Amino acid sequence: GEVEDVRFGGGVDAPELHPQEPGGEEAKNLVSELCPTGMQVYLDLDDLADENPGSAGPFRDKYERLVAVIYVQKDNSWINVNAKVLKWGQQEYPNHDWLKYSYIIRSLTRMWMIG
């Protein structure tokens, strides 16, 4: 299969490895645990990613990474990796800047679903 770099879509702003942000290495380890090398994943591509300034093309950010919600299959059900990382980040790093955008998106999504 083809190997692609993927950035979390769906309002998840995970900590970066370069430059190193608090929680970056831990987030990488969590994703590696949920999506071991060679595991097949389902990507729900972000069709709005190419509208962002500097986008490298359809479904991509300015660094040419695909932007998507990532799902993995386990025991006949699908796990939303983005949601797992967001939940982990809220528990382990509740006051860091990289979570602020995620909170705003989740709040707007809840409002949209309710109203």
Image (cartoon, rainbow, N blue to C red):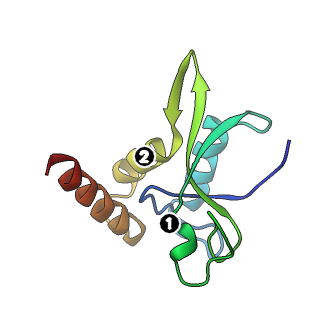
Q: Amino acid at mark 2?
A: Trp
Q: Which residue is mark 1?
A: 48
Relative depth, front residue between 48 and 83: 48
What's the residue at 28%, 65% (across, down)?
Answer: 104
Which residue sits furthest bottom?
53
Residue 92 is left or right of residue 47, and the answer is: left
What's the residue at 67%, 37% (across, down)?
Answer: 41
| Mark 2: secondary structure | helix
- Picture quadrant where residue 61 is located: bottom right
- Quadrant containing the N terminus is top right
Q: Which residue is mark 2?
A: 88
Relative depth, front residue between 112 and 101: 112
Residue 38 is left or right of residue 26, and the answer is: right
In the rendering, at what x and y percent does residue 36 appear? 72, 36
Which residue sits furthest right?
1
Using a 10 Å C-alpha cutoff, classify the residue at mark 2 as few (fewer than 14 neighbours), some (14 to 19) or many (20 or more): some
In the rendering, at what x and y percent does residue 18 appear? 66, 73
